[in-house]
Image (spheres, rainbow, N blue to C red):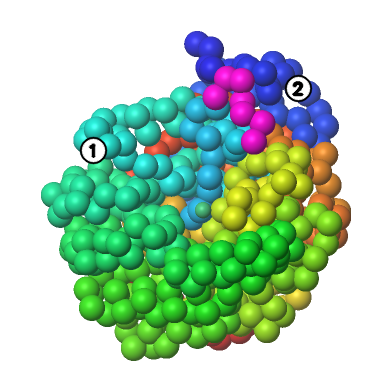
Amino acid sequence: MVESNGVRTGRSWKRPVIGMTGITGIVFALSGLAAAQERADIIIRNGLIVTAEGRMEADVRIRGETIAEIGRDLAPSAGEREIDARGMLLLPGAVDTHTHLNPEMPDPPRPQGNQDDYVSGSAAAFAGGATTISNFISVQPDEDVSAYAARVIGGIEKSAMADFFIHVTVGNDPARFTREMLDELASRGFVSTGEDFLARESFDLNALAWLRVFKASGPAGVLSMLHAEDYSIMAEAQERLMAEGRGSIHNFGQSAPVVAEVVAVQRAVAIAEATGSPIYILHMSSGRAQRVAEEAMARGLPVYVETRPMYLHLTQEVYQRPDAGLYLGGPPLREKWDQDILWEGIAKGTIHTIGTDHTGYSKEAKLDPKQTIADKRMGFSNLQEYLPMLFSEGVLKERITLEQFVAVTSTNAAKLFGMYPRKGTIEVGSDADIVIWDPTMKKTIRDEDQFSNVHYSTYAGWEVTGFPRTTIRRGEVVYDNGQVIAQPGSGKFIPGAPFQRPHLRPTSNRE
Ligand SMILES: [Zn+2]
């Protein structure tokens, strides 16, 4: 529920105290202050700007919502706010390609449901360095595109603080996704469809109709995002394990074997080849399937790959632990060998994006002992830490360069979803989404520091170096030194331009 002054109230939100301090403080900016802040220029001095293309020491002038000037020793302007970023990196705000937040929290919230909405989710995003987040939302059976746009954008814009874009969840009815419908979606900025296509029985039952949808999607400028796991292989494995009395979630890995992903990625590649339409593979987990996608890319097919942070940091061993439930999400975690191939993919530019798949299930719900491989809660609480984790484990351990970090977390996503160069870079004319990143800040991840409503992190206990000091979204400081300072309702829908094959710079040259 949102009051007229835009300050969110409700069971899970204390009325914010302006000036509150403490690491998990959320301070809602007063509208007057926000407006004043928009008028004055901000100059960020002495930082090292990093884009997917390279790095440069320069000052950045922000005017209103956009970047007005980049250069050395910029002249001061009247009333400007100066931020000294000596020793800091200036990174383009990250774009999370795969976020699950509740557009409207049911009142009271359902204990087993997704507890994160666009206030808590945006706060977690800002604290971690993401300024644009996404969601997957279905078109209702009786809904036309106008009604869908009004419901989805209108609903989320009431509470969002981060900017957002939307993937259209397609459900079970391919007949609805005619070329006309796809054109209409694209014209309103909905340029991607998703989620669990190949992992669903209804896909196989309608394979021809879906192939026609994919064929029409490319020319309509819509990117088809596929969950690439084969339904039949997983269903058989699951049935067998359940029948053998081995339905425990400790056997989650066996219930969704690597071969189910391999064959689904082969099929996804075949769809791209047969239709010429671009295909985006959601949450790639295995080295074998990644090799299939890389072979397709080498042949020039429009195949794009997202991975999930978890696969880069954890292996299937965690499923033997008592807290295995925390790490459930399909496809399952794999082996160290797979992990190495995914890191390599980021370095080579064959893994294009990172999507958190953040879903705000409570820790109790994730650890619910009644779960089985047939009935489980999938998703992670990791929106706040995924960038620090990737930086600490990737950049600082020299698995990837800073430029590769920016490409995989921001630039490529902005290009694939039609938001570049508005998002995804630090350039004159781009939205001023800038993260002032302290590459030496060291912290242990703790549940109590989480802005997410579920107050736990998938990475609790990890020692991590490199965090945002300040996050700026469209010219407004929205996070600073542990505090989120933003107005619910200040986040905007960012319409995507119809999909065009982007130039994704290969990033194999290590600096
Ligand atoms: Zn998902």
**As drawn, is 229 to the left or to the right of 510?**
left
Determine the main secondary structure of the stretch shown in magenta.
loop
Find the magenta span and give its range.
106-112
| Mark 2 to mark 1 CA distance (whole Å) | 42 Å
Q: Residue furthest left?
A: 180
- Between 66 and 378, the residue placed more toward the observer is 378
Q: Is residue 226 above or below residue 473?
A: below
What amino acid is found at the position of numbered circle 2 in the picture?
A: Gly
Q: Position of residue 199 (x, y in %)?
A: 45, 62
The secondary structure type at the circle numbered 1 is: helix
What amino acid is found at the position of numbered circle 1 in the picture?
A: Val
Residue tagged 1: 145
Residue tagged 2: 19
- Between 388 and 335, the residue placed more toward the observer is 335
Q: Is residue 187 above or below residue 30?
A: below
Crowding around mark 2 (Cα neighbors within 10 Å: few <14, some 14 to 19, many 20+) is few
Q: Position of residue 117 (x, y in %)?
A: 57, 33
Crowding around mark 1 (Cα neighbors within 10 Å: few <14, some 14 to 19, many 20+) is some
Q: Is residue 99 visible?
A: yes
**As drawn, is 224 to the left or to the right of 128?**
left
Q: Is residue 402 visible?
A: no
Q: Is residue 47 magenta?
A: no
- Quadrant of the rendering where the C terminus is positioned: bottom right
- Between 60 and 160, the residue placed more toward the observer is 160
